[in-house]
Amino acid sequence: MQPLLQIKALTKRFGALDVLKGVDLDVHQGQVVSVIGSSGSGKTTLLRCVNLLEEFDGGDILIDGEAIGYRTEGQRRRRLKDRDLSRQRAMTGMVFQSFNLFPHLTALGNVALGLIKVKGMAKAEARALAADWLGRVGLAGHAAHYPSQLSGGQQQRVAIARALAMNPKLVLLDEITSALDPELVQEVLQTVKLIAGEGATLLIVTHEMRFARDVSHSVVFMEKGRIAEAGPPSEIFNNPRSPRLIEFLRSSRD
Amino acid sequence: MGYTLHFGVVWASFDRLLSGLALGLGLGLAAVAIGAVIGLAAGFASVGPSPFWRRAAGLYVTVFRNLPILVIVLVVYFGLPQWGIRLDKVESFVASLAVYAGAYLTEVFRAGLLAVPKGVIEAGRAIGLTRLQTNAYVVAPIMVRNALPALGTTFISLFKDSSIAAVIAIPELTFEARKINVESFRVIETWTVVSLLYVSTCLSIAALLRALERRFPKF
């Protein structure tokens, strides 16, 4: 079966700095893949390339077999037009480290905006679906609250509902608990476990090793812009092979 | 030598002052409305992706923010007809104040736009909104909220600039006041009443905008 997400020989430079030096990664429908690694290893950049928030210099990203972000004209690679990029972005959902809720909209408005403007749903239908999603992330009582009236954990759960309500093929989670107070981390991780259990396809960048071990089908360790080691969580965490991964796991256990 | 205040003549002409005030408010509103459209377009251009439009917006602001409004009014009213562009007094003044307002509002909107968090814009793009949709449904509302306090100051200042219309004999408040002055020689009385009218109108505008500010959710 064709993987839902195929990343092939992906390279990305920021000026003189090679951030991604040829990354290959497949994610299948219904799979949960976690990307771990120290900061600066390129994890977040990888996610941002998949969501087309970042341009990339070489390689291909395919979702459901469709190459995203660029088209090739003869020898030249050209960035697609805004409208095509927007359509392709809607195939993936993204949850950010810093929540990034729309501050001028209520929790319900945050979830409903994309349904109305991107999916073209009628307002009543969109609001009903948005309310439904807020209920699923445990925030039914907060629909009318603005982001500034919600705790960090609640804001992040709204952001999860906002991403999932769009029914994306693939959800990208970018260090979604890193900006949270420690006591709020678990409610967000529980929400992610819930959607993973419902069969969502997730690509997760995380520093929560226990969570990555619990929720993932596969774990990828990135080091200096490359995938240094990949495998099922039992292998990666119990039987790491590369010295860098062993060192990384030891330091992140502290 | 005492100067006895006599407000009688001013009250006798009070309806003229009120109609002058109404006209001034009308001029200010029309100019602010047009200026806001210019300011929105130039404000978005000034933070946008196109270097050409960024520079064009910058040039526009540089020119019109550094010219006194009186000079703009005189050039548009007396100068443009030499080029075959003939506007009547009111049109000419509204156009002058509008381009002047546009330059200030561009800067107000630009500051508001720069304060929109980048991550929130990315969140809009991430759910599949196009650049234009993101600007309309995410960036613009946040920008307006950011800009409201500065907008209030600018609106008040532009309303007061409607008094400049007196120099091309548009019968707004300042023009009517000068006429009453000339007819009655009640200088202090006339300008006292006119000043109170200006101050109370500006305070009302400020109160209206503060009420509007309160209707927005706090970020």
Image (spheres, rainbow, N blue to C red):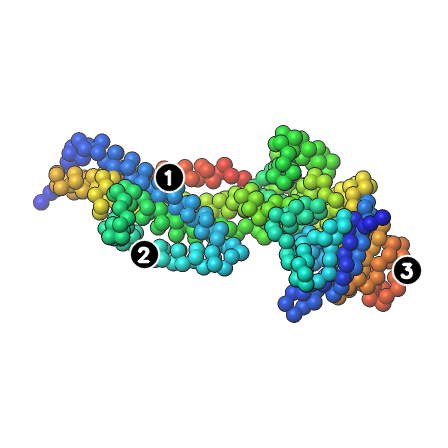
Residue B30 position, x and y percent, is 35, 40
Dot 3: what SS? Answer: loop
Q: CA distance from mark 3 to mark 2?
A: 73 Å
Mark 1 crowd level (few <14, some 14–19, many ≥20, 10 Å Cα):
some
Residue B163 or residue B60, whichever sits in front? B60
Residue located 43% across and 48% down the image: B39
Q: Amino acid at mark 3?
A: Asn
Quarter occupied by residue B55? bottom left
The image's mark for residue A80 is none
The image's mark for residue A239 is 3
Quarter of the image with the C terminus of chain B is: top right
Q: Earlier in the sequence, mark 2 or mark 1?
A: 2
Residue located 38% across and 43% down the image: B34
Residue B141 position, x and y percent, is 52, 43
The residue wearing badge 1 is B205
Residue A141 position, x and y percent, is 67, 33
| Badge nearest the viewer, 2 or 1 | 2
Residue B173 is left or right of residue B126, and the answer is left
Q: Residue furthest bottom?
A: A16
Residue B197 position, x and y percent, is 28, 38
Dot 1: what SS? Answer: helix
Residue A3 or residue A207, whichever sits in front? A3
B115 in relation to B186, above or below = below
Residue A107 is left or right of residue A66, and the answer is left
Residue A17 is left or right of residue B25, and the answer is right
| Badge nearest the viewer, 3 or 2 | 2
Mark 2 crowd level (few <14, some 14–19, many ≥20, 10 Å Cα):
few
Quarter occupied by residue B25? top left
The residue wearing badge 2 is B67
Residues marked 3 and 2 touching at CB (< 8 Å): no
Q: Amino acid at mark 1?
A: Ile
